[in-house]
């Protein structure tokens, strides 16, 4: 039996609600139709950890070699965003890509557990979109800090679902109503329990922390005006719209957005071919 909770803005306050069909019910009995709710991220993590490559279709698409164990990067919590909110592409940047994913939500403090025990530390799951601003890939490929961590690039929601079995579930990403990504969790080389146990060997996971579990093939570029939906069987649909930032990236400091062959190849999913030797690619 699954249970879905959400966080919404209700009469000016952040309120936890339970979904009952098409209605969201607060603890004090107030009710809001789902369609009318102003959503907030369903959890407030202390950290957001993401796996690079995990879905086999993505590995094949990028002509990459899957490492013997998962590799990770981290999104700052300032990148957190919500259902039905705007994803901002900064002025001067062009290569903003979606990556439909499933996020694991930690339920209790977790450290040094076996994969067989990890499920006991998971509260539930939510839908995520691991947006990447590949214009900064040349300078941040090692850390992915600005590529994946810029403001608004981590929408999650609309709710947190408990009691959901991640096995054999379909995950799709749609852009303006057209299916772009279509895969299943059976493509994952490392499942949810493995990822939690792997990270918790050296990093304490706290309640609310998020682990994004990877994306299937066909991540592609989106532009201002596009509506992007990530639909996961049993978890619901996360919807966001892309807008352009009002001010350009400052030119008087730091590396500037670039369009190298690696940037174009990653943003276009292999449709652009390197003229030289292909480099290893991360998600």
Image (tube, helix red, strand yellow):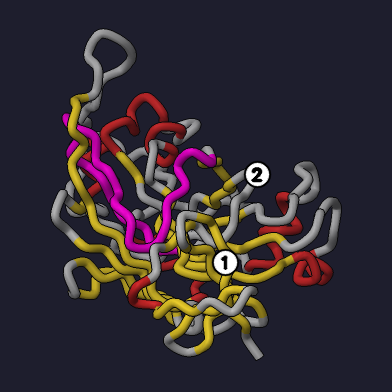
- As drawn, 58 above or below 267: below
| Viewer-closest of 125 and 270 | 125
Residue 18, percent from left and from top: 58, 77
Q: Mark 1 sits on what residue?
A: 189
| Viewer-closest of 2 and 193 | 2
128 part of magenta stretch: no
| Viewer-closest of 166 and 280 | 166
Q: Nearer the viewer, mark 2 or mark 1?
A: 2
Judge the density around disc 1: few (<14), some (14-19), many (≥20) Cα neighbours within 10 Å: some
Q: Quadrant of the N terminus?
A: bottom right
Q: Which mark is residue 222?
A: none
Q: What residue do we see at 66% from left, 56% from top?
A: 208
In this rendering, does residue 186 appear at all? no
Q: What residue do we see at 39% from left, 69% from top?
A: 37
Contact, mark 2 vs mark 1 (Cβ under 8 Å): no
Splitting the image into 4 quarters, where does residue 118 fall? bottom right
Q: What residue do we see at 46% from left, 55% from top?
A: 12
In this rendering, does residue 201 appear at all? yes
- As drawn, 143 above or below 158: above
- As drawn, 104 above or below 93: below
Q: CA distance from mark 2 to mark 1?
A: 26 Å
Q: Mark 2 sits on what residue?
A: 46
Question: What is the magenta range?
Answer: 77-101
- As drawn, 81 above or below 251: below
Q: Is residue 7 left or right of residue 60?
A: right
């Amino acid at each position: 039996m699954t249970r879905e909770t959400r966080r919404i803005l209700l009469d000016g306050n952040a309120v936890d609600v339970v979904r009952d069909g098409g209605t969201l019910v607060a603890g004090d009995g107030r009710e809001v139709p789902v369609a009318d709710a102003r959503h907030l991220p369903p959890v407030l993590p202390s950290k957001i950890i993401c796996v690079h490559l995990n879905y086999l279709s993505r590995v094949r698409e990028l002509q990459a070699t899957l490492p013997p164990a998962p590799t990770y990067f981290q999104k700052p919590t300032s990148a957190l965003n919500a259902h039905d909110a705007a994803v901002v592409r900064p002025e001067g940047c062009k290569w903003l890509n979606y990556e439909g994913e499933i996020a694991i939500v930690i339920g209790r403090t977790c450290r040094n557990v076996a994969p067989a025990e990890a499920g006991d530390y998971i509260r539930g799951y939510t839908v995520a979109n691991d947006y990447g601003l590949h214009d900064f890939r040349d300078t941040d490929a090692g850390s992915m800090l600005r590529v994946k961590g810029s403001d608004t690039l981590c929408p999650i929601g609309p709710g947190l679902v408990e009691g959901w079995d991640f096995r054999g579930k379909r995950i799709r990403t749609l852009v303006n109503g057209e299916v772009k990504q279509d895969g299943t969790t059976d493509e994952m080389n490392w499942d949810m329990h493995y990822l939690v146990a792997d990270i918790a060997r050296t990093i304490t996971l706290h309640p609310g922390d998020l682990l994004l579990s990877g994306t299937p093939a066909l991540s592609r570029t989106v532009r201002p005006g596009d509506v992007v939906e990530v639909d996961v069987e049993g978890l619901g649909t996360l919807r966001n719209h892309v807008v352009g930032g009002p001010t350009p990236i400052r030119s008087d400091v730091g590396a500037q957005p670039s369009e190298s062959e690696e940037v174009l190849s990653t943003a276009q999913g292999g449709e652009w071919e390197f003229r030289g030797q292909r480099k290893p690619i991360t998600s």
